[in-house]
Amino acid sequence: MFKAHVAVTLRPSILDPQGKAIQHALHNLGATAIERVRVGKYIELWVEEDDEAAAEAIVREACEKLLANPVMEDFTIELERVEGEPA
């Protein structure tokens, strides 16, 4: 079994109003050294598969079809072999 760590982020050319709002709020709290904020999604998937390449293909397909908008978002996948049931 593999645990996939998926990070979905807006492409650099896409404006991020939520990130701007967070940056503004952080500046109001005194964190003026923070110059840029980008907001994304973090998703964990447990894949019942023995082969790492097959597990990655399953997760990649999930990202391409559902988890990430291919027009606006990029994604990265990290796989970790795990034993047993998800906690």
Image (spheres, rainbow, N blue to C red):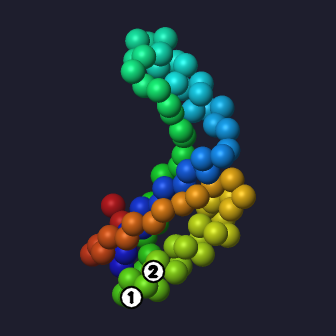
Identify which residue, 26 or 49, lies in the foreground. 26
* Residue at 67% over, 70% down: 65
* Drawn side of residue 64 relative to residue 45, left or right: right
Q: Is residue 16 above or below residue 40?
A: above
Do callouts 1 and 2 mark residues in contact (Cβ within 8 Å)? yes
Q: Is residue 60 left or right of residue 73?
A: left
Give the amino acid at mark 1. Asp
Is label 2 in a helix, a strand or a loop?
A: helix
Residue 66's place in the image compared with 52, above or below, is: above
Q: What count of labels does the image hold?
A: 2
The furthest residue to the left: 83
How far apart are the two marked residues, 1 and 2, measured between alpha carbons? 6 Å
* Image coordinates for residue 20, horizontal then vertical, percent: 59, 28
Q: Quadrant of residue 61?
A: bottom right
User: In this picture, is 17 found above or below 68?
Assistant: above
- Residue 65's tag is none
Residue 30, x across and y down, in percent? 40, 12
Q: Is residue 79 left or right of residue 42?
A: left
Q: Tag 1's secondary structure? A: loop
Q: Residue 55 — which label?
A: 2
Query: Residue at the spot x=59%, y=24% of the render?
Result: 21
Instruction: State the image coordinates of residue 42 (x, y, percent, origin top left).
Output: 48, 52
The location of residue 51, given as percent across then percent down, is 38, 88
Q: Quadrant of residue 67?
A: bottom right
Q: Which residue occupies the foreground of this view, 28 or 15?
A: 15
Is residue 46 in view from this perspective? yes
Query: At 54% from the left edge and 40% from the top edge, which residue is drawn?
Result: 39
- Quadrant containing the C terminus in the rendered view: bottom left
Label 1 belongs to which residue? Answer: 51
Quadrant of the rendering where the N terminus is positioned: bottom left
Write the residue at 55% across / 19% down: 24
Residue type highlighted by circle 2: Ala
